[in-house]
Image (cartoon, helix red, strand yellow):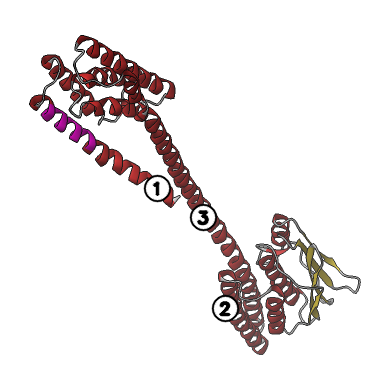
Amino acid sequence: MTGNATVLRRARLADRLIRPALITAAIVTTGVGIFTQEVHARPLTTALYALVTLFALVSFLPWDRIPQRTQLLLASGYAVAAAVLLPLAPHTFAPMFAYLAAAVAGIKLASRTLAVAVAVLDAVCCAVAVAVVGAVTPDADVWPWWLALSVGLPVLLGIARRDRQDALLNAERAAAEARRAAASESREAALLERTRIARELHDVLGHSLTGIALQLDMADALGTKGRDAEAGDAVRRARSLAVDGIGRMRRAVHELREDALPLEQTLASLCANEAVPFEVDGAAGPLGGGVAHTLVRAAQEALTNAAKYAPGAARAVKLGFSHETVTLVVTNGAAGERPAPGAGGGMGLLGMRERATALGGSAQAGPARDGGWTVEVRLPRTG
């Protein structure tokens, strides 16, 4: 698209400089020739020269704002005046105007039919004028009538030039529209990413703050009963949860900023920090956008809930890869009662299901046969 814009700028530069310079040179040299050389019917030639000069100057104006009928009248008047002037001043640059009139018709008139019609009028009038001048002054040096017909050919160049300008202008508009669309998509993607980041951080903070609040409530209750030692333990557990929450927050921000590690390595690191066994089944491979983040968040959610509602119970994480799907299973042993799905400080099972559904997968949670709890998230590998 950049090349098209460059060509368009060059075409506009030519339209602003080269064509006006050529027409100005024709006006000046023709005027000098008419007043310094022998011409036929000088009064008529001078009047036609003035009229042609006026039409040539009008051709500098932007015709897009002129009604089509007026455009046709201007182009036709320019062609007829230039055609009649040609045989009256054959030894000057007057013939150039006849060719320029045809080219102007091709450039300025949006209708190809009208442009060709003006060029034909130019050529016919020129041939008739040459024939009339040759008949009136047999000894005059005039063009052959068949050569006069060639003055209409530049209309083809004018039409080609206009078509090229229109094509380049349309390409430039399309490029600008594509840039605007890309900018809009980029802004939308940025908003979606911000929403996702806010949601992920909400989950991490929700788990940590909920655990801290529970421990502080417990410490307050124990303190009112005079059980200061146990209350101190609860406060220390709250502090431990705060430190752990800060670490989780930093890891979440790091993971959201860059996909530094593959999914299995990220989960292995998470499980190592939690002292939880981790198993991978199947061949790992590339995953679609959002799949890895969703599974990491699900693992964090499930492990945090297991630690909160089944403290001391064994936990385990298994990641399975198949040809079309990737499955995360988090289990824990029996201890206490599980909360209702979606309860807790983070997004809970409801959040897992929403994320999984958005990616074309599923998320389930429920009691296991041994009295424990199982969370299973299954997503397509392509996301």
In what element is the residue under mark 1? helix
**Which x, y percent locates residue 127?**
31, 17
Q: Which label's residue is closer to the chain start, 3 or 2?
A: 3
The residue wearing badge 1 is 5
Which picture quadrant has residue 335? bottom right
User: Image point 26% across, 37% down: which residue?
Assistant: 19
Q: Is residue 323 left or right of residue 50?
A: right
The residue wearing badge 3 is 186
Which label lies toward us, 1 or 2? 1
Magenta region: 22-33
Q: Is residue 110 above or below residue 362?
A: above
Q: Is residue 266 left or right of residue 146?
A: right
The kind of residue on which mark 1 rests is Ala
The residue wearing badge 2 is 246
Is residue 29 in sight in this rendering? yes
**Which x, y percent locates residue 74?**
28, 20
**Which x, y percent locates residue 334?**
84, 76
